[in-house]
Every structure is written in C-alpha cells, then in structure tokens.
Image (tube, helix red, strand yellow):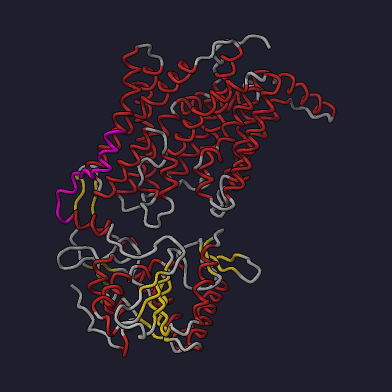
C-alpha cells in the first residue's frame, strides 16, 4: 500500500450527512409531525463517527505515524469544550428550578456524563417504574455520546493490533461487526432496553463506518469499477457513485418511515436502514449528484458544522421547557426551543468549539482534561450528600418533593407474592390482593390495619406487579412477563385458605395506553386501545375470573379507579418559569370532568361484572371527589398523590378506610375518614 498523509481530506458532503442526522434527531425530540422515527439520526451519527475516526487511525497507521497520545488529545479538544459549558449550564438550571429529588438525579446524570457512562446509568434506571420520565432528564441525550466515547477507548487499540495482520484487516473488522450485530439481535429478543443502551450491541454501527473507511482508503476505485461494469452490462445509464447515493438517501428515508411505528424493536434489524443508507452516502463520490448539489450546499454544510453543538444544546432546552410546562410543551414552544438551540450552538461553535479545537496551548488542554474530572467529583459528592437546590428553602415546596418519594409497597419490581401472616390468629383466613401498582398504593393502609387490629384481621397475600393487570392474557406489546405472572396468581383460586380476593388496577389505562394488548389462544397480540373487540375480550376475561373465584367460595372485591391525570400530580401544583423560578399553587381540589366522564364508562362495565357475579364494588372517588372536583392536597398543604396515577403512602395510610372491610373479619370496618 502506498503511504498516505496523516490527515484525511475534508468532504463537505459529510457535513451534509451530519445535517441530515441532526435534523432527524432534533425534529424527533421536538415532536415535529412525520418525524416520530427521527431517532435514527443517532445511527447516522454513529456511522459517520466510525468512518472518520477509523480513517484517521488507518491513515496514521499506514504512514507509521499513529500516536495514541495525539489521538486522544484530538478527541479531548473536539468533545470537551462545549460539553463542559453545557454541563455547567444544566447544573445551574437544576440548582434554580428543580426539586430536591430532581436535583439529586441531575447530579447523578452529570457525574455519569463526565465519565461517559450515561448509557449504562439510564439502562439501570429503566427498570424503575417510578423513575423520572425521559422528558424531564436534561442529560438523557448523552447516552449516545457515551457509546461513542466507549468506542474510542476500545477501537484504537484494537485496530492497532488488527493492523499487524495486514492481509486480513477487512475480514477481522467484518467479523467484529457480525459479532456485535448478532449480540444486538440476540439481546433485543429478551431485553430491548439493554440492546438500545449497551455499547457492544451498538458498536456494529460505528464499525460499519470503520469498515467503510478501509474500503474508501484502499478499495474504493476497484469496487466502483466493478459496479460500473455490472451496470454497463445491463445498459443502465447511471454510474456507481450516483447509484450508491440514491440508494443511500432512499434507505434513510425508508428508515424514517418504517421506524415511525412505535411497536418496532429497535435497533434490531431496523437499524440497518439508516446504517446502510449512511454507508452508501459516504461511500458515494462527493461529486455524485446528491452529494454535490444537496449534501454539499451551504445550508447543509453550515448545519452539519454545528451538529455537535446542536446535539448538546437542544435536548436540555427542550427537556427544561417540558419541565416548566407541566410535562409536555406545545409544537410552537418546541420550535422556539430549536431556534434558541441554533443560536447557542452557533455562539458555542464560534466562541468555544472552533478556537479551542485548533489551539496548541498546553494550558488549554490541561483545563479541558481536568474540568470534567472536577465537575464529576463535585456532582458525585452533591448526589451522595443530597445537597439541596434553592427550592428546598420553601417548606411548601419541600412537601411537594416529599410526596414524590412517598411510596411504600413490598416486592415492587420482582415477580413474587408477598405474604404477611396474622401474628395473633392464623385461622382468620387469607386475603389475596392482586393488581398492578394501583393495588400497590394501598399497601400502607393494609399493613396499618393488620398491625393495629391483629385479632380481627386476616393474613395477607399481596401480589402486585407494576404495569400488569389482574387479568389473564393481558400484557404489554412484546412482553410476556405479565402473562406468566397472571397465570401464576390465578392458580391461587384453588387455595382453600384464601377466602377473599381483591382486584385493583389503573383500569383507565385501557383508554389511554396504546401498548396494552390482549393475547388470544394463538398468542396473537391485539391492541385494546380504541379496539372494541379487544376491550370486550378484556372485560369478558375479567368476568370469567370473578366467576371462577366465586365458584371457589371466595368473596371478591373490585376496586374502581382513583382519579388519574396530570392535574393530580404534585408537580402540577408547581409553577415554574425562567424568570420567576419555582412557585407553588396552593389549590386543594381540581376539576376534571373529562376523567369523570371516561371513568363512568369503565366503572359501569366493572359494576356490571360485579352485579352478574356477586362481587363487591369499592369506589375510591366517593372519598376523593365531590361531583367532578377531586382532592389533590390536605388542609396542611401536603399532596395526596405520588404522581399522576397513584396516591402516596401517607395519605392512603391515614385515609383510605374503604380498603378496611377487605381485611377485617366479621365484615368489620371503620368509619370512613373525612377528607383532611
């Protein structure tokens, strides 16, 4: 091979491909119509990154000038300057506008961001049903940067070793790609979140770019000649370069369309669309029609040049906007956020990124290296020592924060049944409590009554699992754990020691959650959302279960929905603005006629099931609501909800007396507590 220079030639069309990647990503995050599949922009970035990094390493290896030190100095100067500014800015936002628990989580994410482990932190958070929503995590987007940086740790040394086997470099790279891709396909079959966030299930995308780098440097001309000869044989009047670019842009567009389906498992095979599309676009000659006249035009090159700064800035701004707007901003607001992101990105590029990237000063380099370390140490200490944000000085806001973590329930995330025997009398019988997290919310009251009235209470079998209805054949899309769980619990209908069964769930989710499905005997998934046939199957199955429990001499209770909706969340009691900071709205009741009308449809079906099978209905709204006005705070301004769909443990423990009759023998219950 002939010697190459240690620098790769600048290609404006690659900045144009970067522009495609960042536009897709920004429009996806801003929820621009028709861009719900725009998350594939990250995959385009991965291919570009793998191509450029591998091209640099290969050229230096080929000219015997490769230096690990120089490689990582370049990476530091490229990655750290704007990242440091964004991290500090995000911390200041959290300090001024976040609640204690939000601020603690932010410090955790900041620490993870400084050591490029955000993807792993987010993966381990994903198993927590009550974790903060994605829209409120200001550094959520750093997961992809973490994967890239993990690749930069793995790949230079690997390629340095592979290069010693000169005749087999391409084969070895291809073999690693296949191994990583197989890991992706295998992992997604049992844990789609792991497949999304773990580096070794995503490295194949960067390695495709690396594979292309080798082809482009050492094989491109021979491949183009081979393709042109085939095209000429079939009298196709298009050259290889134009064909590759047309196919490349087409695959990315198809990826955007196909990946708009929320039911797909990603990355999986679907990631091949943006990955192969990016591969072909880069592999095309920069003088091909699409690359020259579309990707290399001034606007695309300008946007592509800002892509790194745009990526870092846009998500914290959108996420902060979502936070101060109660969870979701309007399309107009999101568009304005993208405009602000563009301005900040341009300033960052001109004032920070470009000057530092080409600076030769050692002091600048030392500052870049040690500043993230200092930020990581400080934020780690803030996380572990629970240093408080400004909002914690307000006692009412402190109550809001306390309510957000006010949850008590056993075995919250494992598929086991919690048993609590009556310490005084084992002959009082057993109650089976079965449901999703809306059953879990009642644990504090159930435990309190059994502890305070051991002579008159029964033993407890508490079977709750977040997200799983107490109904056979019902699960979430592409998940089977709920199916196995419900079958396990339903077998307890034959247990003679159980004399009472209590079923509770967020039944209202049937009318708002698209991911809930009914699995028929052929394991065919049928969405329940706005599907009258599947909805009828759901309620028919519930009815047959209630009937079976009754036939086995069980007393059956059906607990109707508590009021649900963002109006009930403690965070809805807050008003946040960029200018005025965080304030509390001291309202004790909210009007939600929409929920009340929708709940009437569901409760009427449940009441019909109860009437037909001899079950007993418990209606929490009798305690919580007057007409369409429902309680959200006690008289001393403590919220009664944990979030938008669950009561908190403190309120339930002292007030949810409607649950007492399910646990006490001789149908003894205590007078309903009055609303505080």
Against 282, is 36 above or below? Answer: below
The answer to whether residue 296 shows anywhere in this view is no
Residue 405 drawn at (x, y percent): 28, 57
Q: Residue at x 42, y 81 (%)?
A: 501
Comparing 469 with 348, the one in front is: 469
| Image-quadrant location for residue 92 | top left
From the image, give the main secondary structure of the stretch colored magenta. helix
Placement of 667 over or under 13, stated as above or below: below
- Residue 405 horizontal side relative to residue 243, left or right: left
Q: Residue at x 60, y 40 (%)?
A: 253
Q: Position of residue 475 (x, y in %)?
A: 52, 65
Decide which of 366, 581 is in the foreground and name it.
366
Q: Report the side of 504 relative to 669 (left or right).
A: right
Report the quarter where the C terminus lies: bottom left
Q: Quadrant of residue 242?
A: top right
User: In this rendering, is residue 418 above or below 168?
Assistant: below
**Nearer to me, 415 or 621:** 415
Q: Is residue 379 magenta?
A: yes
Pick the quarter of the image with the N terminus: top right
| Residue 579 in sight here | yes
Whole-percent x, y for residue 610 in the image: 44, 85
Residue extent of the magenta highlight: 377-396
The answer to if 187 sits in the magenta stretch is no
Q: Position of residue 66 (x, y in %)?
A: 53, 14
Q: In the displayed structure, does residue 93 sit left or right of residue 209?
A: left
């Amino acid at each position: 091979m002939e010697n190459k220079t240690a620098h790769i030639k600048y290609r404006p069309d690659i900045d144009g491909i970067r522009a495609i990647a960042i536009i897709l990503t920004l429009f996806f995050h801003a929820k621009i119509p028709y861009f719900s599949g725009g998350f594939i922009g990250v995959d385009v970035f991965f291919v570009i990154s793998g191509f450029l990094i591998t091209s640099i390493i290969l050229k230096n290896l080929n000219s015997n000038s490769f230096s690990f030190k120089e490689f990582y100095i370049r990476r530091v100067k490229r990655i750290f300057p704007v990242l440091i500014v964004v991290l500090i800015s995000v911390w200041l936002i959290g300090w001024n506008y976040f609640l204690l628990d939000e601020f603690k989580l932010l410090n955790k994410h900041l620490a993870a961001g400084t050591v490029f482990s955000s993807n792993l932190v987010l993966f381990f958070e994903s198993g927590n049903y009550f974790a903060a929503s994605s829209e409120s995590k200001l550094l959520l987007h750093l997961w992809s940067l973490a994967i890239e940086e993990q690749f930069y740790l793995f790949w230079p040394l690997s390629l340095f070793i592979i290069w010693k086997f000169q005749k087999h470099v391409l084969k070895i790279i291809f073999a690693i790609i296949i191994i990583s891709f197989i890991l992706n396909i295998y992992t997604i079959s049992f844990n789609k979140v792991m497949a999304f966030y773990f580096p070794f299930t995503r490295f194949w995308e960067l390695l495709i770019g690396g594979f292309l780098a080798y082809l482009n440097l050492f094989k491109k001309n021979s491949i183009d000649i081979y393709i042109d000869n085939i095209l000429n044989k079939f009298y196709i009047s298009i050259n290889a370069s134009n064909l590759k670019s047309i196919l490349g842009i087409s695959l990315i567009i198809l990826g955007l369309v196909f990946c708009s389906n929320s039911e797909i498992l990603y990355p999986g095979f679907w990631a091949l669309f943006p990955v192969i599309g990016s591969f072909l676009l880069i592999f095309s000659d920069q003088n091909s029609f699409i690359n020259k006249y579309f990707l290399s035009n001034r606007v695309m090159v300008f946007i592509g040049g800002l892509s790194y700064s745009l990526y870092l800035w846009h998500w914290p701004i959108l996420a902060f906007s979502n936070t101060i707007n109660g969870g979701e901003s309007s399309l107009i607001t999101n568009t304005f956020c993208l405009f602000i992101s563009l301005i900040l990105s341009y300033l960052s590029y001109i004032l920070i990124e470009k000057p530092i990237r080409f600076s030769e000063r050692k002091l600048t380099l030392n500052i870049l290296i040690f500043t993230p370390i200092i930020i990581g140490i400080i934020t780690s200490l803030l996380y572990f020592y629970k240093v408080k944000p400004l909002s914690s000085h307000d006692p009412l806001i402190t109550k809001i924060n306390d309510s957000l973590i006010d949850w008590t329930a056993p075995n919250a995330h494992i598929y086991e049944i919690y048993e609590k025997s009556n310490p005084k009398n084992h002959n009082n019988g057993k109650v089976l409590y079965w449901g999703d997290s809306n059953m879990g919310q009642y644990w504090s009251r159930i435990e309190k009554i059994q502890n305070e009235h051991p002579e008159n209470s029964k033993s407890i079998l508490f079977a709750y699992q977040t997200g799983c209805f107490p109904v056979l054949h019902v699960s979430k899309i592409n998940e089977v754990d709920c199916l196995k769980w419900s079958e396990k619990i339903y077998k307890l209908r034959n247990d003679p020691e159980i004399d009472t069964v209590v079923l509770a769930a967020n039944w209202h989710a049937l009318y708002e959650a698209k991911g809930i499905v009914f699995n028929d005997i052929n394991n065919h998934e049928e969405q329940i959302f706005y599907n009258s046939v599947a909805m009828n199957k759901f309620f028919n199955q519930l009815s047959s279960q209630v009937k079976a429990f009754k036939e086995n001499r069980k007393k059956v209770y059906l607990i109707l929905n508590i009021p649900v909706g963002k109006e009930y969340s403690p965070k809805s009691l807050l008003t946040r603005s960029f200018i005025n900071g965080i304030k509390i709205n001291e309202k004790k009741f909210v009007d939600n006629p929409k929920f009340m009308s929708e709940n009437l449809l569901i409760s009427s079906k449940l009441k019909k099931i109860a009437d037909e099978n001899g079950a007993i209905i418990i209606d929490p709204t009798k305690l919580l609501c007057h007409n369409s006005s429902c309680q959200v705070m006690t008289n001393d301004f403590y919220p009664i909800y944990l979030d938008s769909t669950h009561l908190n443990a403190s309120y339930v423990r002292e007030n949810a007396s409607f649950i007492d009759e399910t646990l006490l023998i001789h149908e003894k219950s205590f007078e309903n507590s009055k609303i505080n």
